[in-house]
Amino acid sequence: MTVVQNYWDWRLSYNTGSAFGMFAGQNGSRIFLSVIGVAATIAILLILRRARDEQRWMTSALALVAGGAIGNVIDRVLAGKVTDFVVWKVGKTEWPAFNIADCALVVGVAIMFLDVGREQKKAKEKDARKAAA
């Protein structure tokens, strides 16, 4: 179903692999990808326990990544595949179908990169002030 002509469609599809269909149809990929998702979520929870109060952007980003991972693991465990339904395109060029969990993962990772860059910039400015003093 077209939402915005030549830009956005709803199209039901299923992905038995990971991003862009990697590992699709391979024996054990369901278990492997589920274990990776659960392990990543556990690692994120451990990181969040150590986060400082002022790390709001990073904790929000990690929560998005964990939520996306959990969403895809639930699909994979219950259905054996991830349900994708959003297709973005420009004219005839289409990106692979994705879902809301994928959006959470991508936005979370993007926020992490931006936050790490911001923190590095702060550290450089702090070092420059120390050197100038």
Image: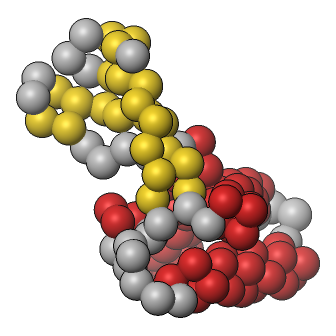
Quadrant where the N terminus lies? top left
Quarter of the image for residue 108 reads bottom right
The percent coordinates of residue 42 (x first, y second) are 80, 82
Pick whichever, 68 or 120, lies toward us: 68
Quarter of the image for residue 9 reads top left
The percent coordinates of residue 36 (x first, y second) are 62, 84
Residue 98 vs 66, above or below: the answer is above
Quarter of the image for residue 91 reads top left
Q: Residue at x 33, y 62 (%)?
A: 20
- Badge count: 0
In-image side of 18 versus 67 (left or right): left
Pick whichever, 31 or 45, lies toward us: 31
Residue 76 vs 10, above or below: the answer is below
Pick whichever, 131 or 2, lies toward us: 2
In-image side of 66 versus 54 (left or right): left
Residue 101 vs 4, above or below: the answer is below
Rendered image coloring scheme: secondary structure
Q: Residue at x 25, y 43 (%)?
A: 95
Question: Can residue 122 be seen from the camera position used here?
Answer: no
